[in-house]
Structures are given as C-alpha cells and as structure tokens.
Amino acid sequence: MIPIVPPKVEVVKDIVLGLIENSYSRSEVKEWIIGMQKEHSIIFPGCMSFGMKNRFAEFVMFALFCINEVGVGKFDSPGEQFIRDVDLEEYLACLNEEDCTEISGNIVRLRPHQIQPVKKVYNTIVGIDCGNGQLLKDIGVFINRGYFLDLNDYREEALVEYCGSHFVLSYSHNINNNDLYIEGFECEK
C-alpha cells in the first residue's frame, strides 16, 4: 500500500514515476488518491483542493482519480486507458520543469513553468469541429489528458505559443459537441 502522506510535489513525482516504472499499479494509485482525498483534501462549496501551491501538481492529483478509467475518450480504441502512458511521462516532465521543445510550423508547445503568470484570460476565441477526432491528431503538438474533478470533465489540453501570442487548446470528452476550443491569455511581463 502506498503511504498516505501530506501532498507535496515530490510525493506526486514519486507516484507518477512509480506508474511509469511499474513500481505502482494503476489500482494501487487509485486506492492511494482516494485515501489522499479522505485525509488531505480541503472541501469548498462546489470544489475540492489538496492545498498545493504548485497548481500543476494539483492538476496531476486530480488526473489520478481517473487513472483506471477505460473507454471515456470519445475517440479511444476499445479498452484504451484515458490517462495514457504518454500523459504520465508528460506529467513528470512538467513536474520536473523540463522545457518543452516541440514545434510544429509556427506553433510552439509550452509547459506551465515556461510561461509567466497569467494576467488576463480571454473568452474562447473559436471552436473547431474535430469531426472523427482526426484534428486532435493533426494539430501538430501533443495534447495532454487530464481530469477536472469538480466538473467531472475528462479533458485534453495544450499550452501553445503562436506568433508571440499564447493560447490554450482545450478539448472536452464530456461536452456533447466535438469542438476543440482555442482560448487566449495574456501573461504578466
């Protein structure tokens, strides 16, 4: 059994690395995250937090709630895990603050530590119909999967820079439409 300890970035890194290296099974991690929720979560009206200063580490904690979910992705193959091994590897790279070097044309994918704090978030700029899901594959950059517990929302997201401007590419597997949303934001200078 994985010890239930106060949530810290190093603990989250250990869990994710354990999943990648098969030191921990997905079932063990699911039991662990439920134990963490019981012992270390803070409940607010309509939401929950683990009280971590590192918001990405908190995002990863929420993703671990659906570590065993199969078949929830709209375009997944039968039996495919929603949180894929590549998502776990991306979580670890983000937690270790490794710079992302992925570029596709004028699109540069970023990791959370590579942007300044967000000053202003704009409404959705555009929604593009994904059709049969091919757009998610053709976008040219890796889109990481995660889970927003309070919204019960299975999502794929990527932070990108295009011609000097910053955007979030966001796709929800729960919303009835098939749109990939592009949302803009402005960073502090």
Image (cartoon, rainbow, N blue to C red):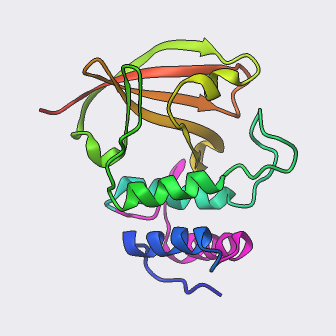
Furthest residue in direction left, as rendered: 189
Side of 138 relative to 97 (left or right):
right
Q: Quadrant of the C terminus?
A: top left
Query: Residue 140 in the image: x percent, y percent?
Result: 52, 27
Q: Is residue 45 shown in magenta?
A: yes
Is residue 43 visible in the rendered image? The answer is yes
| Of 38 and 118, the residue lying toward us | 118
Side of 47 relative to 187 (left or right):
right
Query: Residue 144 in the image: x percent, y percent?
Result: 54, 43
| Of 21 and 33, the residue lying toward us | 21
Please determine whether, in this image, residue 72 is positioned above or below residue 26.
above
Residue at 60% over, 23% down? 138
Please determine whether, in this image, residue 132 is positioned above or below residue 14.
above
Please determine whether, in this image, residue 110 is positioned above or below residue 14.
above
Q: Quadrant of the N terminus?
A: bottom right
Side of 148 relative to 84 (left or right):
left
Residue at 54% over, 83% down? 4
Query: Residue 2 in the image: x percent, y percent?
Result: 60, 84
Please determine whether, in this image, residue 168 is positioned above or below residue 131.
below
Give the residues drawn in magenta, as a range: 24-52
Residue at 76% over, 54% down? 69
Is residue 44 visible in the rendered image? The answer is no
Q: Is residue 75 shown in magenta?
A: no
